[in-house]
Amino acid sequence: MSAVTVARNVRVAIWTLLGVLVIGGVIWFALFTANKPAAPAPQASADPAIVREDSHRLTTPATEKAQLVEFLDFECEACRAAEPLVNELKKDYGDRITFVHRYFPLPGHLNSGAAALAVEASARQGKYEAMATKLFAAQPEWGGKQDSQGALIRTYAEALGLDMARFDQDVAAEDAKDRIRRDIADGKSLGVTGTPTFFLNGEKLTLNTEAQFRQLLDDAAK
């Protein structure tokens, strides 16, 4: 089998997996369903539910042509499958498009909340992308489990060289939990029911192929 055929088969598998694994449902996770109001945040656009001023921006173009916002779950297999493509798109369009991550832990993923908190705690030490990348890479180790994987996830933070006392404090912090609750609430208000869900300049995307995705970004980045 040629390298071109292998690459094509990988792409087809990724889009098939995305179609199968983007699931609906009401968000469920005890940590984030407490009857506690989300912390207020400054508005970043006409619709702050899409992207907020303190949302995690992965690219910072000198001249922004568009914003691509991804609601994601670090325990979601479809998000993991999409990550290599998203990373390619960041390289190709990051000088014109701002790529943004929003948290959206899904029901049935019992460790997705803990993963989101670990990423948020890492972000407070400047390691958002490093922790997000590690969690996706190690997802087969900790994802899909029916018991807490918090201790294992904590070892990833140690491997990144984080200040662990501060990490533990931030994982337990109410404002970190509030941030994730707020992202979930924003996603639900926008009709997000599965992950990954993308918004391009405020418009929710229905994606079928990589070529279609790239064409949308091409058009937006002009």
Image (cartoon, helix red, strand yellow):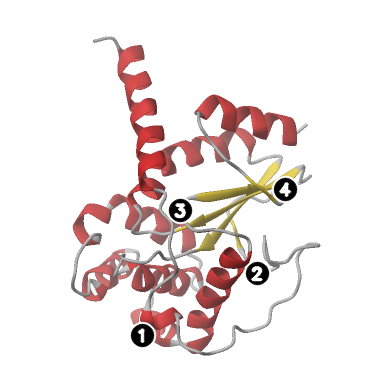
The residue that mark 1 highlights is: 165
In the rendered image, residue 66, in percent from the top left (x then y), is placed at: 73, 44
Residue 153's x, y, as percent? 28, 68
Which residue is rendered at x = 76% and y = 70% of the image? 43
Please state which of the two labelled residues, at mark 1 or mark 3, is closer to the viewer.
Answer: 3
Lower position in the chain sequence, tag 2 or tag 1: 2
Q: CA distance from mark 2 to mark 4?
A: 17 Å
Circle 1 crowding by C-alpha within 10 Å: few under 14, some 14–19, many from 20? few
What amino acid type should be assigned to the residue bearing mark 1?
A: Ala
Residue 108 screen position, x and y as percent: 31, 65
The one of 48 and 176 positioned closer to us in this rendering = 48
The quarter holding residue 169 reads bottom left
* Label located before the other in sequence (2 or 3): 2
Q: CA distance from mark 1 to mark 3?
A: 32 Å
- Residue at 78% across, 62% down: 45
> Which residue position is annotated with label 2?
54
- Residues under numbered marks 1 and 3 in contact, where contact means CB atoms less than 8 Å apart: no
Tag 4 residue: 201
- Above or below, 68 against 40 in this view is above
Picture quadrant of residue 134 = bottom left
Q: Of the two numbered discs 2 and 4 on the same chain, state the one appearing first in sequence.
A: 2
**What is the secondary structure assignment of the residue under circle 2?**
loop
Mark 4, secondary structure of its residue: loop
Helix, strand or loop status at disc 1:
helix
Residue position for label 3:
195
Q: Disc 2 residue type? A: Asp
